[in-house]
Amino acid sequence: MAKVGLETLKRAAETKIPFVAVLGQAAGWGENRDPLLNRALVLAIDNAWPAHHFDSMLDEAAIEIGIKGLDIAVYRNKRLERWQDLVACFHSPEEAREGLRRAIRAELVMVFGSA
């Protein structure tokens, strides 16, 4: 059985990542499995942003381009899966935040125009 840090497992449970998918990949990793499994779980956790993480980016972009009265939660929920997929394209959470900030702003401009 792989030895994964307790803190990593706690974070994984909090973010509800797909454990089965990560563990299924680990089956063929051989004797290096433990550190690789730990790293795979950490990456999965870092890429599993809860919905509310996008709200401030969406709100800031809406204010910046002059959109008033936008229901942030409704708009976010319609695009959440696509935005979560984009997070996985980046090497770090900081880079993902910046990339998502740009993507959300560009999307709002495309949909609603700019002031």
Image (cartoon, grey):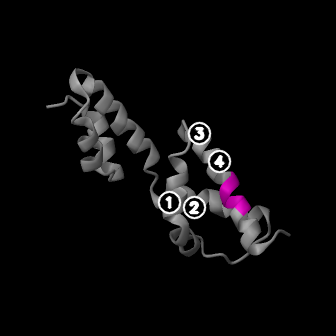
Say whether disc 2 or disc 3 marks the residue closer to the N-terminus.
2
User: Helix, strand or loop at disc 4?
Assistant: helix
Label 1 sits on what residue type? His
Local packing at callout 2 (Cα closer than 10 Å; few below 14, some 14-19, many 20+) is some
Which residue is denoted by mark 2 in the rendering?
55
Which residue is denoted by mark 3 in the rendering?
94
Local packing at callout 3 (Cα closer than 10 Å; few below 14, some 14-19, many 20+) is few
Q: Main secondary structure of the magenta part?
A: helix
* x and y percentages locating residue 83 in the rendered image: 55, 58
Residue segment shown in magenta: 102-106
Say whether disc 1 or disc 3 marks the residue closer to the N-terminus.
1
Do labels 4 and 3 touch, CB within 8 Å?
no
Q: Which of the numbered marks, if any, corresponds to residue 52?
A: 1
The total number of labels drawn is: 4
Image point (54%, 45%), residue name: 89
Above-or-below relation of 61 to 77: above
Label 4 sits on what residue type? Gly
Local packing at callout 4 (Cα closer than 10 Å; few below 14, some 14-19, many 20+) is some
Q: Which of the numbered marks, if any, corresponds to residue 69?
A: none
Question: Was residue 60 drawn as part of the magenta stretch in this picture?
Answer: no
